[in-house]
């Protein structure tokens, strides 16, 4: 490969051609339509007419296909959110996200990165939409996570366990289900794309799940409420501090049972491969 800089005319054309590709499609007619009047005339003039299509029409094909391909990826990555919103309404928000944050890498599967945060900031959506997007994003992250060796405690780890933080495996997650979304997500994963999905109802109290990516896909385990809360705390706090936070929120009866339950929950999480290591609390080493 040559290390020479590309000629300025090529950089300029690529920039203008990219602007044509990313031009938003019009939704006012109920279909996605390329707005060719907004194309840069200088770019149009550099594209040849074909026997059956003008230069503008040819550019419109690229413009539409750019968006259709990206929207296909978005719908596949956020299948539950798309089904709950309807593809038309979902595409409206997906297009707004992609226009604000156009893909910057060669890997088109990275285009949806961050859409769950984007959709959570949209104010006029039902409250369960953000949780549906969060579940889709969690599932997607696990499927793309690198393989890591599960953490297995040693005798040398015992004295420092309470003062250290467990490192979550990138192939695991803890999910708090505040709306009835999980069964619908599992149905889609099993290929039930034709089944109707109703708007979810609120869950009180929430359910907790452990998710782990395995060779056959994502495996899930139902967790006790306290178990889910503790595993989430231990992902960001030293083990001893996480236990102290849990204890503060317990009733007298729950506080008495917590040590035995915590030992069992921690052992189960290690056995399932939810951690990838044990590290010292970095806050204690900062001056």
Image (cartoon, rainbow, N blue to C red):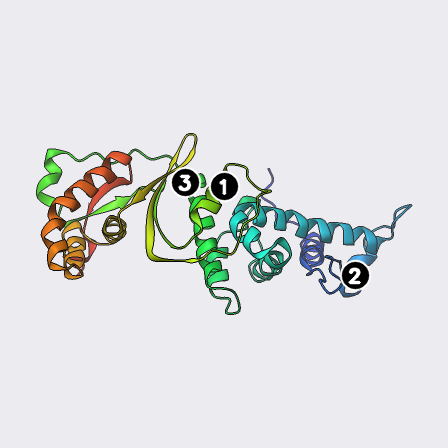
Query: Which of the two labelled residues, at mark 2 and mark 1, occupies the earlier sequence position?
Result: 2
CB contact under 8 Å: marks 2 and 3: no
**131 relative to 72 in the view: left or right:** left
Q: Nearer the viewer, mark 2 or mark 1?
A: 1
Q: Nearer the viewer, mark 3 or mark 1?
A: 1
**215 relative to 75 in the view: left or right:** left
Mark 2–mark 3 distance (CA, rounded to whole Å): 40 Å
* For residue 261, above or below residue 156: below
Q: Residues within 10 Å of mark 1 (few under 14, many from 20)?
A: some
* Label 2: element kind: helix
**270 relative to 86 in the view: left or right:** left
Q: Residues within 10 Å of mark 2 (few under 14, many from 20)?
A: some
- Quadrant where the image shows the C terminus: bottom left
Viewer-proximal residue among 180 and 121: 180
Query: Which of the two labelled residues, at mark 2 and mark 3, occupies the earlier sequence position?
Result: 2
Question: Is residue 114 in view from this perspective?
Answer: no
Q: Determine the residue positioned at 21% across, 43% down.
A: 265
Q: Residues within 10 Å of mark 3 (few under 14, many from 20)?
A: some
Viewer-proximal residue among 168 and 260: 260
* For residue 287, above or below residue 159: below
Residue 183 in the image: x percent, y percent? 45, 45
Q: Which residue is mark 3?
A: 145
Viewer-proximal residue among 156 and 124: 124
Q: Which residue is mark 1?
A: 187
Residue 282 in the image: x percent, y percent? 20, 54
Residue 98 in the image: x percent, y percent? 58, 57
Residue sitting farthest toward the right: 51
Q: Which mark is residue 36?
A: 2
Mark 3–mark 1 distance (CA, rounded to whole Å): 22 Å
């Amino acid at each position: 490969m040559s290390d020479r800089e590309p000629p300025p005319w090529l950089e300029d054309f690529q920039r203008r051609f990219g602007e044509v590709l990313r031009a938003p499609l019009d939704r006012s007619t109920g279909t996605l339509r390329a707005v060719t009047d907004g194309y840069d005339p200088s770019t149009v003039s550099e594209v040849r007419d074909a026997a059956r299509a003008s230069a503008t029409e040819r550019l419109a094909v690229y413009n539409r296909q750019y968006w259709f391909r990206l929207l296909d990826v978005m719908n596949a990555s956020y299948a539950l959110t798309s089904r709950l919103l309807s593809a038309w309404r979902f595409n409206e928000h997906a297009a707004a996200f992609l226009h604000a944050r156009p893909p910057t890498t060669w890997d088109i599967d990275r285009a949806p990165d961050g859409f769950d945060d984007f959709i959570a900031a949209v104010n006029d959506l039902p409250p369960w939409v953000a949780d549906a997007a969060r579940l889709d994003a969690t599932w997607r992250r696990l499927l793309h996570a690198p393989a890591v060796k599960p953490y297995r405690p040693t005798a040398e780890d015992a004295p420092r366990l309470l003062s250290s933080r467990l490192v979550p495996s990138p192939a695991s997650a803890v999910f708090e289900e505040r709306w009835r979304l999980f069964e619908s997500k599992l149905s889609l994963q099993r290929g039930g794309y034709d089944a109707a999905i109703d708007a979810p109802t609120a869950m009180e109290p929430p359910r907790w799940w452990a998710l782990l990516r395995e060779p056959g896909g994502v495996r899930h385990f139902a967790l006790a409420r306290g178990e889910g809360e503790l595993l989430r705390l231990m992902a960001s706090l030293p083990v001893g501090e996480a236990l102290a936070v849990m204890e503060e929120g317990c009733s007298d009866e729950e506080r008495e049972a917590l040590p035995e339950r915590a030992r069992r929950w921690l052992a189960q999480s290690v056995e399932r491969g939810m951690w990838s290591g044990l590290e010292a609390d970095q806050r204690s080493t900062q001056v």
